[in-house]
Image: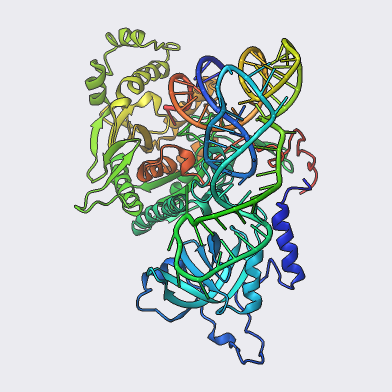
Amino acid sequence: MADFFHPDRLQKLEDLKTSGTDPYPAQAGFAPLAAAGDGGQVAASNSPVRELATDILAKSEERQGETVLIYGRVLGRRGYGKLAFLDVWDQSGRIQACLQKDLVVPEEFATLKQMNLGDIVAVEGELGKTKVGEPTVFGTRFRILTKALENPPEKFHGLADAELRARRRYVDLFANQEVRDSFFRRSAIIQAMREVFLERAYTEVDTPVLHPIYGGANAKPFSTHHNALDMQLFLRIAPELYLKRLVVGGMERVFEFARVFRNEGLSMRHNPEFTMVEFYEAYSDVFGMMELTEQLVVAGARAAGCEQEDGSLKTTFREEEFNLTPPFARVSYADAFQEHVGVAATDREALPAKMKEHGIEVADDSEYAWWKAVNDLFENLVEPHLRGPIFVHDYPAAICPLAKPLQDAPEWAGRFEFFLGGMELANAFSELNDPQLQLAKFEEQVVDKDPESPNQVDLDYVRALAYGLPPAGGCGIGVDRLIMVLLGKDTIRDVLLFPHMRPEKDFGAADGEPAETCADGE
RNA sequence: GGGGGCAUAACUCAGUUGGUAGAGUAGUUGGCUUUUAACCAAUUUGUCCCAGGUUCAAGUCCUGGUGCCCUCACCA
């Protein structure tokens, strides 16, 4: 690792030090110039405040001649010996700086020689225009704020390798403004959704990530161990059961942007940790959740910039255009099933033939197994047609252990799934609040020994229901997938800052050496 | 887990029927006071993913491995 850093850059670092310049100064600004013989003194109070590139450019016409201060990373340089143009990039974008030998403080101009592309600099100077009319900061002060020891990517093609882009996201972010923008938009989408909740008097909460019993979804969990209590714990696969406990407690409207963890494969739409927003509202139901989900998607779409000139909301995802202008379509599970399978979902005479046709087997003679097979048909034959945005409502009760059966048709339960872009984006229930029925359903799940089913009955949750959960609607939205569609990103990796990857050799965690050496400590 | 593809300089990529490693960018040196993928001249940099094998000779062919991408399966 001796040659880890680039020797050329190390040399310049040394040159800076020997010339008395700190390559990593603690403060970013410019110190006032010492009173020199020629009287070029600048008082600290006259020093301008740092501004973002795009803010300066937005008003560059009116502000000609003003002194401005910019900070940023130099990603382009065109030098002329006694003159250099720099492309200075900050969070907002690019602005050009021009350093002329006869304008810049001489010892500061000299440090330009120690600057490489990728270094982070400060330029203070007068805002003006070049001969071709580009707004430019004509520097009088110049300072390297951080000496970079790694080369930035090739300036025209940038960082193209998908693996490197994800592994070194920090490079991807500064080298590619589009990438940076899409993550700012991700944040804006989430903020817009949060505001929808807050306007409706929802409370944002945080519930445990470490669960002694995993539940609220069907998925394989990550397992860990708590030393002091000597107990097994699981990273949550869903926050659902804790959020509903809060509703029992009288927090009638709660939401959580919850990182959840599922120990399953990776794909273009799966990451082992991802973000769900779950929300619960007392005295609402699955149709109330439908309305709110629609509002959330619309708010997210606006924040993502999907709004067209005619006021409609559109996005293009995987080369397919989706119209997100409300209201979204709604169809019942039974109707959709009938339409695309050609047989009623309740037709126990005709369905076995259909199942056989598609290689679907009923695992055993339980109700759950039967309806699971029916639902496999639905997934294979119906879901591909659900381009969305569309709500499918009223699901078979047997496959919905947390949803309340319909009063006049108990084979069906108050549940919807929301489809968009060929993906399941949301799942909502009229929450099951009958403690006895809930207990029975939990016990069935535990008996079936499915590794994805809860490991044991969450009796405390049943007890919470026994205290009384008001009628309520609840919903979970896959935030990352929604953002994929809204931003038109094909893979979940493009909307996750640090998607899961195998550790890089020599860089990642324990390369064959287990870090399990701190059992007593910490 | 199955199938297909890719892996060459810090970055983007060439590399012929197997013949001893290339370009552009970045870096270095010099020139240049209005460029913007600046330009001109010179110049440095390689575990050709790893380990075997075939061969007089392997970046190239073969086998195995690793990583990544695509795709299918899995993922209510």
Residue A489, can we see it?
yes
> Where in the figure is residue A71, as x and y percent of width and height?
54, 68
> Which of the pair A180/B19 is nearer the observer?
B19
The residue that appears at 42% across and 16% down in the rendered structure is: A369
Say if A347 sits above or below A242 in the image: above
Say if A101 sits above or below B46 in the image: below
- Residue A460 located left or right of residue A338: right
- Residue A451 located left or right of residue A187: right
The quarter in which the N terminus of chain A is drawn is top right
> Which of the pair A343/B29 is nearer the observer?
B29
- Residue A101 located left or right of residue A442: right
> Which of the pair A144/A322 is nearer the observer?
A144
> Where in the figure is residue A331, as x and y percent of width and height?
24, 32
Query: How many numbered badges does the structure rendering display?
Result: 0
- Residue A321 located left or right of residue A34: left
Residue A456, can we see it?
no
| Coloration of the structure image | rainbow
Say if B19 sits above or below A271 in the image: above
Occupied quadrant, residue A449: top right
The residue that appears at 41% across and 12% down in the rendered structure is: A362
> Where in the figure is residue A459, as x and y percent of width and height?
54, 35
> Where in the figure is residue B74, as x and y percent of width and height?
48, 22
Say if A261 sits above or below A71 in the image: above
> Which of the pair A427/A340 is nearer the observer?
A340
